[in-house]
Amino acid sequence: MKKVLLIIPAYNEEDSILKVYKEIKKYNEENDMVLDCIVINDGSKDKTGEILDQNKIPHIDLVENLGIGGAVQTGYKYAYEKNYDIAIQFDGDGQHDLKYVKKLVEPIMNETSDFVIGSRFVEGISDFKTSFMRRVGIKIISFFIHMTCGFKLYDTTSGFRACNKEIINLFAKDYPREYPEPITTVEIVKRGFKVKEVGVNMKERMGGKSSIHTWKDFYYMVNVCLSILVIGLRRYQK
């Protein structure tokens, strides 16, 4: 049986983190695949840390806010040190649907894919699509990814992703602090790994606020597209 870890970055998620953890426990009780989890408390300033301590939820407290890239890499380092076979990025805000974990890891289990991305925009599964302007930005980023590495990805900013042990080891050593989802996808494709996008359901946040704000969307899009072009010029070896 392969060891599977949920990496859950959390910044000021006092409204949702306990609910998410209880859903994971319930999932483990009702399914044959057991999911371990580690919450990365990314310097939260609310009661997230207190809730994690009081409920004995497995977690790592970061002394300062590293952002999504630094928090997720901490999770990958933990997965590497604990010798996990599969790691899944899973949001602490309640947006990701545990029912789709098996669909996410199946291509890795049967060794047809190394990296699997859960998507709101394929197979018509998810009713929640995010705002119109975000969708426009996602399409533009998708164009740049396809132009750079030849891979057509529809949900470029999805944080619901699973990878095998080889990529765990890679991410534990090197993971971008900014724009990690689209940048790592380009890097993985350029290195020759097998990447797959599968349809999943996503929900609206249980609470808290998104790390990307409306006034930053244009700045984010321009910078991530430039970063993709730079990454695309690099030569990689698997």
Image (cartoon, rainbow, N blue to C red):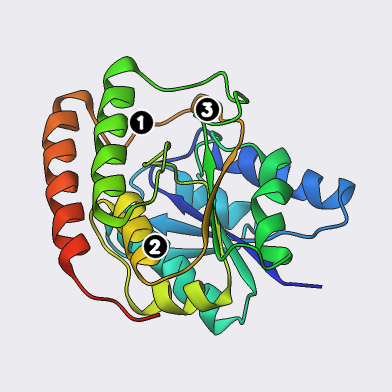
Q: Quadrant of residue 170?
A: bottom left
Mark 3 in CB contact with mark 1 (< 8 angstroms): no
User: How many numbered callouts?
Assistant: 3
Q: Is residue 121 visible?
A: yes
Residue 206's disc is 3
- Examine the rendered structure and indicate whether residue 42 appears above or below residue 79: above
Between the residue at mark 3 and the residue at mark 2, the CA separation in whole angstroms equals 33 Å
Mark 3 in CB contact with mark 2 (< 8 angstroms): no
Between the residue at mark 2 and the residue at mark 1, the CA separation in whole angstroms equals 31 Å
Callout 3 crowding tier (Cα within 10 Å): few <14, some 14–19, many ≥20: some
Q: Give the residue number, with chain letter if any, for mark 1.
A: 209
- Examine the rendered structure and indicate whether residue 105 appears above or below residue 122: below
Q: Is residue 43 visible?
A: no
Give the SS element for disc 2.
helix
Identify which residue, 168 or 47, lies in the foreground: 168
Callout 2 crowding tier (Cα within 10 Å): few <14, some 14–19, many ≥20: some
Callout 1 crowding tier (Cα within 10 Å): few <14, some 14–19, many ≥20: few
Residue that appears at 32% across and 68% down: 175
Residue 189's disc is 2
Q: Amino acid at mark 3?
A: Met
Identify which residue, 69 or 107, lies in the foreground: 107
Q: Is residue 106 toward the left or the right of residue 75 in the image?
A: right
